[in-house]
Image (spheres, rainbow, N blue to C red):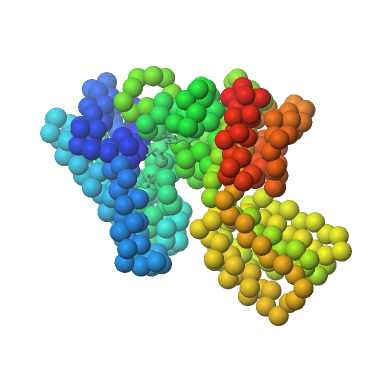
Amino acid sequence: MKNLIVQKYGGSSVADSIKLKKVAEKVSGRIKKNFKLVVVVSAMGKTTDNLIKLSKEVSNNPVPRELDMLLTTGEQVSASLLAIALNDIGIKSKSLNAFQAEILTTGDFNQARIKNLKIKKIRNLLKEFDALIITGFQGITEEGEITTLGRGGSDTSAVALAAALGAKCEIYSDVAGIYSTDPRLHPAAKKLKYITYDEMLEMSSLGAKVLHSRSVEIAKKYGITIYCGSTFSDEEGSFVMKKNIEQPVVSGLSVMDNQTQVTLSNLPLDFTLVHQIFEKVAKEGLNVDMISIISNSGLNISFTVIEDKKTHVSKALSQILKGMKGFNIDYSSGYSKISIVGIGMKSSSGVASQYFMALKDIPVKLVTTSEIKISCLVEEKYKDKAVKSLISTFEL
Ligand code: ADP
Ligand code: ASP
Ligand code: MG
């Protein structure tokens, strides 16, 4: 369809009725320029956080299916309100939840993945309506169960819809694009005009919540350029795309707090144990990161998980290591992972040396690298110092 745009507005953009009306005006402005819009919305403001809090008031361990039933209500409120506001200003629009829009996902409650989008209905409705407002973050399974895509998942709903509909994709939030680092924490951060999929993927999975990392995976797979801009200003935003015309060595820095380092020391020198440990952890659906294995007189394994999962990991490890003696397990929390990302690292040397020069006064616990990133784990008390030093070294 010609002139079709998928736009996504995040929680802060639809936080109250005044903001919702402003979004409605923005949508209407585009429609008056001869576009048809599919608008994906998140829940209003802190709604999702508050719903999670509420669930924790009735259970320490809410049943995942019921949590999704609860959380998806948030997006239905904002979608219907936006459709009401749009109709009020004369724009023919209709809201659809994931069930009505037929967004099919896997059955992994709280972290489902989109499998299929049936766009025939959306296309037909677009003949009649100028704007369709679709609840982000949610899906349904073949069996009709309601799922969510993981925190921040509305970005993924939007990119998946754009890919399926062959439309442009614009993601609006409270910041005017992608910056070298979180502009709320570092107001001097530089706005990046372009960033590649690979860089953005690293930044998102390393803590930059401005885009859900799955949304970037889908954009990369289908070659969708994502425009990220501000909802309430006309300042030019950023493009997430295949090539970064500017090719900086280091484009950005991300920080992820609440990391726990798990260290197993003095295990017997048996490498099948390494496999067994990581197999068990994977089976439990736990994400491990920053792995280091050192073998001398015994086997020492260290890895990180997010703090929330500490008890879960500890249970899994005790099952695997039951009956074994002579080794130690240590769980140290309160760490932050700081990463620098840049496509130009592939082709330039000396980045690691600059990186460690910047961190020379900071006790680094673990380091991991890929072709386009270097991450280190530091105690939270050193975080600000490390971040400042890296920002200044790499001129971020
Ligand atoms: P929305 O609710 O619109 O989805 P989010 O809160 O999920 O918005 O994401 C936007 C936030 O991401 C910004 O307010 C900013 O604090 C944060 N952020 C973290 N890293 C970056 C970055 N590198 N560039 C831009 N924003 C970032
Ligand atoms: N409302 C959901 C959340 O807060 C989804 C999103 O914002 O993208 O995680
Ligand atoms: Mg978000």
Q: Quadrant of residue 330?
A: bottom right
Residue at image position (76%, 56%) is 293
Residue 307 appears in the picture as rendered: yes
Q: Position of residue 188 (x, y in %)?
A: 50, 22
Please state the quadrant of the image where ligand 1 appears: top left
Front one among 40 and 127:
40
Residue at image position (58%, 71%) is 315
Rendered position, 351 above or below 153: above
Residue at image position (35%, 62%) is 56
Q: Is residue 156 left or right of residue 85?
A: right
Q: Quadrant of residue 94?
A: top left
Numbered label tally? 0
Front one among 49 and 137:
49
Q: Position of residue 364 (x, y in %)?
A: 70, 43
Quadrant the C terminus occupies: top right
Residue at image position (58%, 55%) is 333
Q: Position of residue 234 (x, y in %)?
A: 35, 19
